[in-house]
Image (cartoon, rainbow, N blue to C red):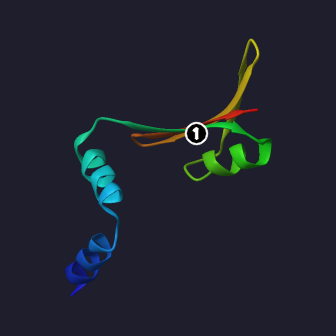
Amino acid sequence: MNKRIKKKKFNQLTEEERTVIKLFRECDGVSFSKYNESIESARQFTSILNQPKLSESENTIWFSSEKSKVSATAFLK
């Protein structure tokens, strides 16, 4: 029964979401990025994975986090 529930939920995803899942299962790593974010939204986005780390280089500031083969980065305005 558990497999039926998972299959039903998978079928409720959009085609784009199903494609992302298929790619994720085949890849070595995946990265998600957001740009021109406020501090709070950047921190919130990257904290989905793990405790975000604040970094800075020249005039660019960003939050990033990683978990397993997934990384998330959000650049500030």
Q: Which amino acid does label 1 sit on?
A: Ser
Q: Which residue lies furthest to the front in this view?
A: 15
Image quarter where the N terminus lies is bottom left
Please state, as top left, top right, bottom left or bottom right, where the C terminus lies in the image: top right
Which residue sits furthest top?
A: 58
The one of 21 and 2 positioned closer to us in this rendering: 21
Residue at image coords 76%, 16%: 59
User: Which residue sits at x=73%, y=33%?
Assistant: 76
**Element assignment for label 1:** strand
Residue 69 placement (x, y as % from top left): 39, 40
Left or right position of 62 against 48: right
The image position of residue 42, as x and y in percent, is 70, 43
Q: Which residue position is annotated with label 1?
A: 65
Query: Is residue 77 rendered to the left or right of residue 75?
Result: right
Res 64 quadrant in image? top right
Residue shown at 62% from the left, 45% from the top: 46
Please give left or right for residue 31 compared with residue 48 in the image. left
Which of the pair 75/50 is nearer the observer? 75
Residue at 23% x, 75% y: name it.
Answer: 7
Q: In this view, does 3 lie above or below 57?
A: below
Categorize mark 1 by other alpha carbons within 10 Å: few (<14), some (14-19), many (20+): many
In the depicted structure, whether residue 5 falls above or below residue 54: below
Q: Where is residue 14 in the image (x, y as percent from the top left)?
A: 34, 64
Is 37 left, or right, of 12 in this rendering?
right
Where 16 falls versus 36 (above or below)? below
Give the answer, above or below, for where 47 lies relative to 31.
Answer: below
Q: Residue furthest bottom?
A: 1
Where's residue 32, x and y in %?
Answer: 49, 40
